[in-house]
Image (cartoon, rainbow, N blue to C red):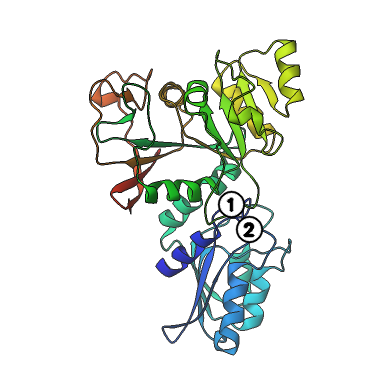
């Protein structure tokens, strides 16, 4: 199952809205075939593993990270392929929450195949947290906040400079990470000071270019900003409590979508209505604090770099107050990953 989980993540950025899935076939305890879902619309992990195993699949055990699909979609039903291949036993990490595809376990049992569900379920669910969010809590995207900070939790020095706190390996990882989201967001101050591109520039090319989202508040971006200049090439949404008619018209003329929303919850609901099921927020401190205060963050991706920026550095989180330690919400560690001299820490809300 560990191998299947490692294989599954190779589909990051390419399979959404499907889940990440990896599969391994064991004959007499030895792997004889493996595969992963590599591309939306392409063969599923189980089908790839079965093709690799061939006749050795008969009487073997299939280990897979997500319950095999029971229905025909863009690909044949995996449950039917497993039955036809003569698999004797299927071990599954997590059930499929998608009602259109679920039921594969029951179909396999009805065919006389031994089915076990639950091995490494927590790991598989963390790997597919965005997919599960879509099916369990519709109405807003899965929200991940990504921070790159110093050891004393600063996102920039006293002058506002943040390039570069983290090293090259960490920055490469961030581009890979971005590829798995429908949107990349920042606050208005970050957009003004950093003038970011908010694009994916790495070895993983996302299946769909992430939409760029700026939560402006009462700030505004001028026509010289990179996000405005390139809006005709990359989908770009600016969100503010209100736009004047002339502001909205000028932005539309440049290819930008101007969206009015009174609160962050309203803004996220409007993004969800536009088909954005996941978003990674990359700054700034006040936006992060407001999202945390509103209970709108599902995962924190924190890159910690071995540098101190001192009292004059800009805090990673602002405007978020906790009454006492007893009232503090404790999050769950989802992953720890070394990135050269830096460390990535992923935390999920309970």
Instruction: Please determine whether, in this image, residue 102 is positioned above or below residue 315.
Output: below
Instruction: Please determine whether, in this image, residue 135 is positioned above or below residue 262.
Output: below
Marks 1 and 2 sit apart, C-alpha to C-alpha, by 6 Å
Quadrant of the frame with the C terminus? top left
Element type at mark 2 = loop
Element type at mark 1 = loop
The disc at residue 25 is: none
Q: Which of the 4 image quadrants contains residue 75?
A: bottom right
- Residue for point 70% across, 14% down: 247
State the residue lying farthest toward the front: 224
Instruction: Please determine whether, in this image, residue 34 is positioned above or below residue 339.
Output: below
Instruction: Please determine whether, in this image, residue 95 is positioned above or below residue 85.
Output: above
Label 2 packing within 10 angstroms: few (<14), some (14-19), many (20+): some
Q: Which residue is tagged 1? A: 97
- Residue for point 56% across, 63% down: 67
Quadrant of the frame with the N terminus? bottom left
Q: Nearer the viewer, residue 12 or 53?
A: 12
Q: Position of residue 12 (x, y in %)?
A: 54, 55
Q: Position of residue 340 (x, y in %)?
A: 31, 53
Label 1 packing within 10 angstroms: few (<14), some (14-19), many (20+): some
For marks 1 and 2 on the same chain, the one whose residue lies earlier in the sequence? 1
Taking 126 as reference, is 200 left or right?
Answer: right
Q: Position of residue 135 (x, y in %)?
A: 60, 45
Circles 1 and 2: CB atoms closer than 8 Å: yes
- Residue for point 54% across, 81% down: 88
Q: Nearer the viewer, residue 338 or 69?
A: 338
Taking 137 as reference, is 330 left or right?
Answer: left
- Residue for point 73% across, 18% down: 250
The disc at residue 102 is: 2
Q: Position of residue 186 (x, y in %)?
A: 51, 29
């Amino acid at each position: 199952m560990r191998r299947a989980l490692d294989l599954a993540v190779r589909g990051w950025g390419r399979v959404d809205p499907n889940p990440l899935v990896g599969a391994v076939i064991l004959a007499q305890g030895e792997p004889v075939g493996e595969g992963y879902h590599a591309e939306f619309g392409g063969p599923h992990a189980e089908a790839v593993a079965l093709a690799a195993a061939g006749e050795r699949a008969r009487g073997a055990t299939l280990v897979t990270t997500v319950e095999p699909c029971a229905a025909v979609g863009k690909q044949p039903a995996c449950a039917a392929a497993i039955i036809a291949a003569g698999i004797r036993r299927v071990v599954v990490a997590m059930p499929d929450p998608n009602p259109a595809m679920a039921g594969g376990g029951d179909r396999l049992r009805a065919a006389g195949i031994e089915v076990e569900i639950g091995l490494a379920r927590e790991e598989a669910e963390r790997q597919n947290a965005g997919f599960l969010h879509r099916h369990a809590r519709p109405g807003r995207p899965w929200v991940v906040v990504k921070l790159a900070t110093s050891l004393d939790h600063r996102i920039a020095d006293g002058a506002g400079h943040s390039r570069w706190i983290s090293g090259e390996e960490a920055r490469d990882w961030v581009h890979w990470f971005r590829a798995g989201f429908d949107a990349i967001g920042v606050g208005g101050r970050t957009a003004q000071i950093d003038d970011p591109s908010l694009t994916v520039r790495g070895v993983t090319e996302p299946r769909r270019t992430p939409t760029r989202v700026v939560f402006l508040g009462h700030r505004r971006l001028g026509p010289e900003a990179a996000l405005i200049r390139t809006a005709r090439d990359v989908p770009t949404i600016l969100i503010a409590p209100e736009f004047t008619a002339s502001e909205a018209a000028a932005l539309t003329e440049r290819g930008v979508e101007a969206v009015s929303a009174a609160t962050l919850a309203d803004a996220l609901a409007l993004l969800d209505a536009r088909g954005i099921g996941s978003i990674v927020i990359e700054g700034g401190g006040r936006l992060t604090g407001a999202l945390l205060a509103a209970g709108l963050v599902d995962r924190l991706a924190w890159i910690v770099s071995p540098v101190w920026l001192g009292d004059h550095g800009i805090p990673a989180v602002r405007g978020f107050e906790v009454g006492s330690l007893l009232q503090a919400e404790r999050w769950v560690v989802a992953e720890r990953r070394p990135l050269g001299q830096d460390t990535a820490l992923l935390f999920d809300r309970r």
